[in-house]
Image: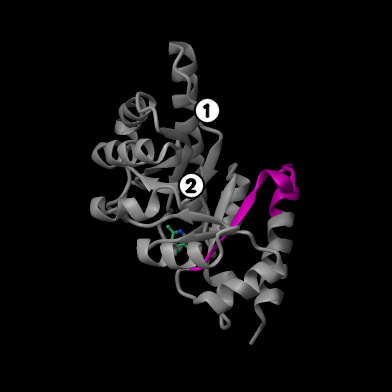
Amino acid sequence: MTTLKQRWESVEQSVEEACASAGRARSDVRVIGVSKTVGLDAVAEAIEAGIHDFGENRPDELVRKHDAFPDERWHFIGNIQSRQLDKVVGRACLIHSLYQTKHADKIDRLAGEAGIVQPVLIEVNDGESNKQGVADDELVAMLEHCAALEHVRVEGLMIMAPIGDASVARATFARLRALRDKAQAEFAQRGIDMDLHELSMGMSNDYPEGIGEGATMVRIGRAIFSADYAG
Ligand SMILES: *Cc1c(COP(=O)(O)O)cnc(C)c1O
């Protein structure tokens, strides 16, 4: 058994190593502690250990934890349901999992009512293991749709790699980065103002691969919060 603080230190060390071997600065990568399986006590312990970005995948939990710890940064990383979006908009510093235009429109409306601009990432499908995310060839259209929304700001892309094989994960992340570079170049050429600087890619089992391919955010749950995580 390990303590949260020990696990966090070990994650931090691996993140530093992955940054060093990719020739990147540690400050280029933000670690998001995915607290979706733990309660308020563990979040308090994590804050004490120095974690200030947290990820949640259920709106009610986001509300509960955000309201308990309003000074921390709360990321929404879960499946979006239209009727729950009012709980997420404004509370989430970043929504990682947007991929449908109807949800973008609703976020725009809710953010407009609240007088804010909601930062989001567009989730891209990994092409095999899951259903969420836009397909590669629909990404530009989705980004264009969002570029026209006054109260939604797209800051980058997110992906979940298939579980299991590190080389597959790495290829998935490389593909996301290439897609981002291509979309960014296209928007620049067309004079559309969009800065896709964030790449949210990498979880407990594949964050070194994410960092190696340019992740600016890694979403780590078990490696931080699970006492029996073996790595
Ligand atoms: C649960 C979850 C994570 C964290 O996964 P771990 O394997 O526990 O690190 C990251 N991203 C998303 C979208 C998740 O749902």
Of residues 185 and 22, the one nearer the viewer is 185
Of residues 25 and 89, the one nearer the viewer is 89
Name above or below for residue 178 compared with residue 172. above
Instruction: Give the farthest residue toward the top.
Output: 190
- The quarter of the displayed image where residue 42 is located: bottom right
Residue 76 is a magenta residue: no
x then y, percent, for residue 37: 45, 74
The magenta segment is: 18-35
Instruction: Give the farthest residue toward the bottom.
Output: 1
Is label 2's Cβ within 8 Å of ligand 1? no
Q: Identity of the amino acid at label 2?
A: Leu
Please name the residue that numbered disc 1 is placed on. Answer: 195
Name above or below for residue 62 compared with residue 223. above
Q: Secondary structure at mark 2?
A: strand
Q: Identity of the amino acid at label 1?
A: Asp
Please name the residue that numbered disc 2 is placed on. Answer: 94
x then y, percent, for residue 165: 47, 60
Q: Secondary structure at mark 1?
A: loop
Q: CA distance from mark 1 to mark 2?
A: 15 Å
